[in-house]
Amino acid sequence: MNNKPIYDLMPWYVNGSLNEQQRKNIEQELANNPELAQEHDFLQELQSQVKQTQVGSPGEFWLHRLRRDISNQSLEKTTNKWRIFSVAASIVLVFQLGVIVNITQPNDIYTPLSDVGTDAGIGFSIGFDAGRTIIQIQFSSAATVLKINSFLLELDAVIVDGPSSAGVYRIQLEKINAKALKHLRDNPKLIEFFSEQ
């Protein structure tokens, strides 16, 4: 019987939706099993009661009344609930913003990884010298640390700040001259763009 217990097939038998072989197998079992016959009688009685029950529509009058009652409900209760939730959500957002701003505030002065040193008392990182030229530069994604370091040594430049979230570095040159500009322009594989501050 397709590995299904006979009790599981009884509702389909009562409905008459089993194939011929399944129906014959159940009829044989009904003749030999009084408990199964009792289940069959119960399901047939249940089916006849369900068919006799007439469920009517509530009608247009009740539908109209239901719609009227729904429209007459005051929206103030739901509006007040949403106001409370929106105020609470605003307070939570302001608190979260305060926490995020507090976390992202830089409290440390970064120390250089090279021997350039920092200017004490000024607060600049990595040896900033006000008399030197600052250039903003973005290295290409293919640039390696070795290539960037050798490039900076050739220019006699130092990274002052960066990288920013956009990948922009600020480098400090002794002075910008034609040789330095040519060197910056002649490295398109290493430098995506540069500009003087």
Image: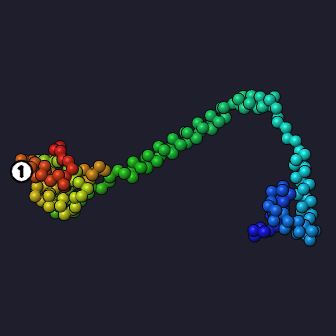
Q: Nearer the viewer, residue 134 or 139?
A: 139
Query: Residue 40 falls in which quadrant of the image?
Result: bottom right
The quadrant of the rendering that contains the C terminus is top left
Q: Residues within 10 Å of mark 1 (few under 14, many from 20)?
A: few
Mark yes or no: residue 37 visible: yes
Q: Secondary structure at mark 1?
A: helix
The quadrant of the rendering that contains the N terminus is bottom right
Q: At label 1, which amino acid type do we have?
A: Lys
Depicted 19 relative to depicted 175: above or below: below
Name which residue lies at 92% across and 63% down: 38
Name which residue lies at 75% across and 68% down: 2
The reply, left or right, for residue 4 in relation to residue 151 is: right
Q: Nearer the viewer, residue 22 or 48?
A: 22
Mark yes or no: residue 170 visible: no
Residue 171 horizontal/vertical position (percent)? 18, 52
Q: Looking at the image, which residue sits at the far left? A: 178
Q: How many marks?
A: 1
Residue 193 horizontal/vertical position (percent)? 20, 47
Q: Looking at the image, which residue sits at the far front? A: 20
Disc 1 target residue: 179
Depicted 77 relative to depicted 98: above or below: above
